[in-house]
Image (cartoon, rainbow, N blue to C red):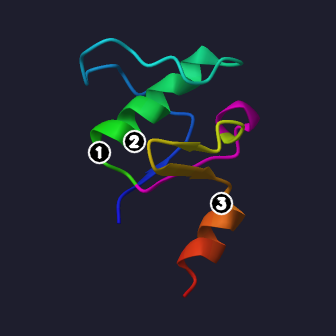
Amino acid sequence: MRVVVDTNVFVSSFFGGIPRKIVDKDPDDNKFIECAVALNATYVVSGDKSLLGVGEYMGISIVTPRQFMEAIKD
């Protein structure tokens, strides 16, 4: 399993291509979606409300830390 954790650290757009526009309320959060897609991540773990509002993108679940811990508990 691969996981991207939003730590509010700048992630540059070195993945190339046209940036995805997924998070309308806070376009700066799109970099986390880009990173997760590029890494074939299963989860993005975040406390950011705009990012959490997306919920799921291309099979990637965007969840709170608590939701993530519950999901991997078993």
Asked whether residue 50 is drawn in magenta, I would say yes
Residue shown at the point (65%, 44%) measured from the top left: 55
- Start and end of the magenta stretch? 42-51
Numbered label attached to residue 36: 2
Residue indicated by mark 3: 65
Q: Quadrant of residue 56?
A: top right
Label 1 residue SS? loop
Asked whether residue 24 is drawn in magenta, I would say no
Numbered label attached to residue 39: 1
Q: CA distance from mark 1 to mark 2?
A: 5 Å
Is residue 26 rendered to the left or right of residue 73? Answer: right
How far across and down, in percent of the image, does residue 34 sit? 39, 30
Task: Please state which of the two labelled residues, at mark 3 or mark 2, is closer to the viewer.
Answer: 2
- Disc 1 crowd rating (10 Å Cα; few below 14, some 14-19, many 20+) is few
Label 2 residue SS? helix
Is residue 60 rendered to the left or right of residue 53? Answer: left
How far across and down, in percent of the image, does residue 18 sit? 33, 11
How far across and down, in percent of the image, does residue 25 sit? 71, 18
Using the image as rendered, state which of residue 58 and residue 36 is in the foreground.
58
Q: CA distance from mark 1 to mark 3?
A: 19 Å
Say which amino acid is labelled 3: Pro
Say which amino acid is labelled 2: Ala
Say which amino acid is labelled 1: Leu
Residue shown at the point (55%, 24%) measured from the top left: 22
